[in-house]
Amino acid sequence: MHLSWLTLLFLVPTLCVGMPSTTLCVDDVRGTGDLGVVVERATGSVLIVETTTHTRLAKIQGLGDLSHASVVFSRDQRYAYIFGRDGGLTKLDMLRCEIVKRVMQAGNSVGGAISQDGRLVAVSNYTPGGVKVFDAATLELLADIPTQGSKVVGLVDAPGQRFVFSLFDAGEIWVADMHSPRSPKIIKFKEIGKQPYDALISPDGRYYIAGLFGEDGLARLDLWNGEVQRILPNYGKGDIKKPVYKMPHLEGWAMAGDYTFVPAIGQYAVLVVDGQRIPVHGQPVFVIARPDGRHVWVNFAFPHNDTVQVIDVMAMEIIKTLKPGKAVLHMEFTPRGEEVWVSVRDDDQIKVYDTETFAEVATLPADKPSGIFFTARAHKIGL
Amino acid sequence: MTCIAKFNLFLLPAVSAEEISPERQSDLLHLLRHDCGACHGMTLKGGLGPPLLPESLAKYPKAFLRQTILLGRPGTAMPPWQAFLTQAEAEWLLEQLLKGIDDNAP
């Protein structure tokens, strides 16, 4: 249905993939603020998309194993840095639709971040653990921060030219001051809780919150005063834990009004940091606030991953249940939130919804799509 | 690995893989790459969970691995799959893992 003439028109530019070319791939003269990158996890490719027109502009191949891949953007919003599962770090020029540089930085990586000043890109690794820091322009390795074999998760940028990350096995949060990129200064916060599995940072860059898998609760580090506090301890007390078939993600800050929303672990519930809990359809994976904060969208782990639910923040209850299709992996709002793009892996589709009426407004084909990343992230702390 | 000792190795009955239909086999491989892959990596080279490659699994008794798949490992992130897999299916998946899965298979 949406394979419009526009899409067809852009099949021609995709031919420039892989060929060094000096012509702009996506158009003659254009900005990049309306673009995004969709990860196609099984084929090692990404799509460059335009959000306003719901179109695919190009497909870039040869990016390796992209399961669990994530993306950050240069602050001029021209380059995308793609962190692949196989340890590949790729710098993509979205205007020329070409890979500028690609390095294999570790055996097994899981995420990355771009520094406050946009000059450094950091990658966190499962194997052999640790964080590596690269020059954002050249992808030259500048620093290697080993973590004694502990898997690193929840890597974000923070004000003060810092990177913050958590050690899954060791139960620690580390803050790396990168003012001298080749010799980072590390501050370690120990015994923050058992098995931090992911983390996020508040939009002002003050609070870093790590979700814990090994116990109920979350660890909150206040980067202003260096204090670590446990939040929502024992939230599951007395309840039998349900198996978790996919680790939840903490991404962005599901802060809506005065409330912060996070996924529970082993419970079919979304937790509100003031102590409320909202029962939902399954184990939540992503809990993301619409940019205006009025609604919170939630997707779920296997075997409930055909569903998306919407929580109304005023009523603190579910107002809509959608069934986008088989294996919903990610959701990304347009910058001001009038639409949301949803990746449906096993249906090989991206679905776009109107966030007011919940009507489906577009469908785009994509090969086993997972993460969706719009360039508006370039200017947000922690994304 | 020490955790072997922590489990009561009650042996599950031996089962043959012959009853699994080709369609179900392809569903199972899909599950393996994508849903097991969520933790073990799509190419099973490891992620939050350890690699599931022939060389990394060879050291364990088969019955122990089958039990890991069906019952999970309490206290770790490995969940039980018995609600979704029969013993025969777990056995079949395990055989594929021990043989090695072609990365390029769909």
Image: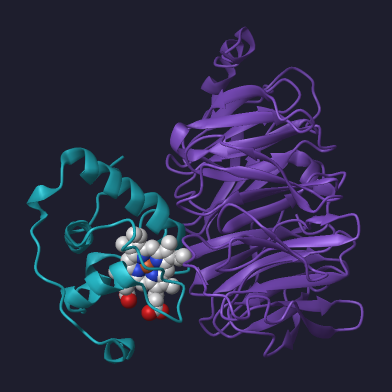
Chain colours: A purple, B cyan
State the residue lying farthest toward the top. Answer: A5
Percent position of residue A9, x then y: 60, 11
Image side of residue A194 versus residue B106, left or right:
right
Image side of residue B102 versus residue A372, left or right:
left
Residue A138 visible (yes or no): no
Image side of residue B2 versus residue A283, left or right:
left
Asked whether A222 or A356 is in front, the reply is A356
Residue positioned 42% across, 59% down in the render: B41
Image side of residue A40 versus residue A228, left or right:
left
On the image, which quarter does residue A253 sit in? bottom right
Residue positioned 69% across, 30% down in the render: A353
Percent position of residue A231, x then y: 77, 78
On the image, which quarter does residue A36 sit in? top right
* Placement of A337 over or under A136, stated as above or below: above
* Placement of A141 over or under A226, stated as above or below: above
* Placement of A307 over or under A203, stated as above or below: above
Quadrant of the image for the N terminus of chain B? bottom left
